[in-house]
């Protein structure tokens, strides 16, 4: 295995935390034990299974370190794919132990990986499986009358005790299987878009038109049926009554991932994300708006989860909101690394207003969960929390690869620019080395991609190519 990525940056807590998070990510990589045919990833030692959407986000973190590992992490969900096309919610010791599925991010992970690393296994192994997964969801989780997708259980959505779906003690289900839920519909739209990107990359044309039609149809359905015109926010459609049920949670911002989203709606969503009373908290992107009556510092009812924050950041980037995205990304990463510094580990979720765990609870109303997993966020969690490293590289430092072309798009804080310190980025697997020199507010760079060297300047929030690899 190659050496991990490394950075030298003005904030030494973040720099040291970056290295520590890589160590935790590696520690949660597991050998091919039981029925697993290859290495796989657990989110944390307390979660000794491969979970579908956890693994997808973990793969998005591994793509900078070793894309071959990233692909291996996704293989269990093809290896154990059901005959009807369902990808399992979780696999334990090579056995399927849940009848549910999970949010569909395999395709998004594969799309990202294939930008950095072309591999025939994506076309020949994963693409047929993801196409079957699409068909399964349309057959089993789709309401023909309203043209919307739904979950059958809040645990299928992954956001278990959100106030949209369940009571605090999780005993009362608010009828999730009768909701055209905003999260699943936005996720399925991106699932289709990601498959389309992969097909284009491999020159596959068969079936493209039907995927484009589903993207357009679903985009219209989300915009027309899930927009709460009174609150000016996306909500869930009650499939039995036809009424919108809206709670201001992070899921309401997933439609920002749709690049064709109406610009007026985009601006309204961005304004709410930039509001310090709602989502622009000390550690941004609480899972429930800070000023909402439903907000609590308990699991998915208010604390910050890095995977849903990452989706919101991706949505901001897709709509050209680089400056607000980079400001929020910086505080998000700082929150993860300052909490690591103060508490000594990486965790499932974070306090939107503090850099510690003192006021956080983990499913306080659920006695079984309290006994089995404790009353605080699970530690040694380098599941999707490892995305903090991806966000640092991808959004703040601005290193990206698109179809083999390496780009530099720095979004540095004013404090970093003023420090006039050098920034160094090493990606050993790709043989990419970048030095950024900060002088008088300008950014000069020396970059090596493979064996090709290039020197130049780039504006903060600007963008330039640094070579192909």
Image: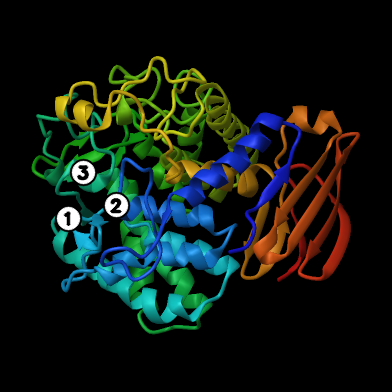
Q: Is residue 193 visible?
A: no
* Residue to which mark 1 is pinned: 97
Tell me the residue at 57%/26% (across/down): 341
Instruction: Please report whichever mark, 3 or 2, sits nearer to the chain's N-terminal start.
Output: 2
Could you tell me residue 105's position as x and y percent? 37, 57
For label 3, the crowd category at 10 Å Cα-Cα, with few meaning under 14, some 14 to 19 and many 20 or more, is some
Tell me the residue at 34%/31% (across/down): 249
**Dots 3 and 2: beta carbons under 8 Å?**
no
Quarter of the rendering containing residue 348: top left
For label 2, the crowd category at 10 Å Cα-Cα, with few meaning under 14, some 14 to 19 and many 20 or more, is many
Q: Vertical placement of 271 versus 448: above or below?
A: above
Residue closest to the far right:
440
Measured Cα–Cα span from mark 1 to mark 2: 9 Å
Element marked by disc 3: helix
Instruction: Please report whichever mark, 3 or 1, sits nearer to the chain's N-terminal start.
Output: 1
Tell me the residue at 22%/48% (across/down): 156
Could you tell me residue 269's position as x and y percent? 45, 35
**Dots 1 and 2: beta carbons under 8 Å?**
yes
* Residue to which mark 3 is pinned: 155
* Residue to which mark 2 is pinned: 49
Quarter of the rendering containing residue 93: bottom left
């Amino acid at each position: 295995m190659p050496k991990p990525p490394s950075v030298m940056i003005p904030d030494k807590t973040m720099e040291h935390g970056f290295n520590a998070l890589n160590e935790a990510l590696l520690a949660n990589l597991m050998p091919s034990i039981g029925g697993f045919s290859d290495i796989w990833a657990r989110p944390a030692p307390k979660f000794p299974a491969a979970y579908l959407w956890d693994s997808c986000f973990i793969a998005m973190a591994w793509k900078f370190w070793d894309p071959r590992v990233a692909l291996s992490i996704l293989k269990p969900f093809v290896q154990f794919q059901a005959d009807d096309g369902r990808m399992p919610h979780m696999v334990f010791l090579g056995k399927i132990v849940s009848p549910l599925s999970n949010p569909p991010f395999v395709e998004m992970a594969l799309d990202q990986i294939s930008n950095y690393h072309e591999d025939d296994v994506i076309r020949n192994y994963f693409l047929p499986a993801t196409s079957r997964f699409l068909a399964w969801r349309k057959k089993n989780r789709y309401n023909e009358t309203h043209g919307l997708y739904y979950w059958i259980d809040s645990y299928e959505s992954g956001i278990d005790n959100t106030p949209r779906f369940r009571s605090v003690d999780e005993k009362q289900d608010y009828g999730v299987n009768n909701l055209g839920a905003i999260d699943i519909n936005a996720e399925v739209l991106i699932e289709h878009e990601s498959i389309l990107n992969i097909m284009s990359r491999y020159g596959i044309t068969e079936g493209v038109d039907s995927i484009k039609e589903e993207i357009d149809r679903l985009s219209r359905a989300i915009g027309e049926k899930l927009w709460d015109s009174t609150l000016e926010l996306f909500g869930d459609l009650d499939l039995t009554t036809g009424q919108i049920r809206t709670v201001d949670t992070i899921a309401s911002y997933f439609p920002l991932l749709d690049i064709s989203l109406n610009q007026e709606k985009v601006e309204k969503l961005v304004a709410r994300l930039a509001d310090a009373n709602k989502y622009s908290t000390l550690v941004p992107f609480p899972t429930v708006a800070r000023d909402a009556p439903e907000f609590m510092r308990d699991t998915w009812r208010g604390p910050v989860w890095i995977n849903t924050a990452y989706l919101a950041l991706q949505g901001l980037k897709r709509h050209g909101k680089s400056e607000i995205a980079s400001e929020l990304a910086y505080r998000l990463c700082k929150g993860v690394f300052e909490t690591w510094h103060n508490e000594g580990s990486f965790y499932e979720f974070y306090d939107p207003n503090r850099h510690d765990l003192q006021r956080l609870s983990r499913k306080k109303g659920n006695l079984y969960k309290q006994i089995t997993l404790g009353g605080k966020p699970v530690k040694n969690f380098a599941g999707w929390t490892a995305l903090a490293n991806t966000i640092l590289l991808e959004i703040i430092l601005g290193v990206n690869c698109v179809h083999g072309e390496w780009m530099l798009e720095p979004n540095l804080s004013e404090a970093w620019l003023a420090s006039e310190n050098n920034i160094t980025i090493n990606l050993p697997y790709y043989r990419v080395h970048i030095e950024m020199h900060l002088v008088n507010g300008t950014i000069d760079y020396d970059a090596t991609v493979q064996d090709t060297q290039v020197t130049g300047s780039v504006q903060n929030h600007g963008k330039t190519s640094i070579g192909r690899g």
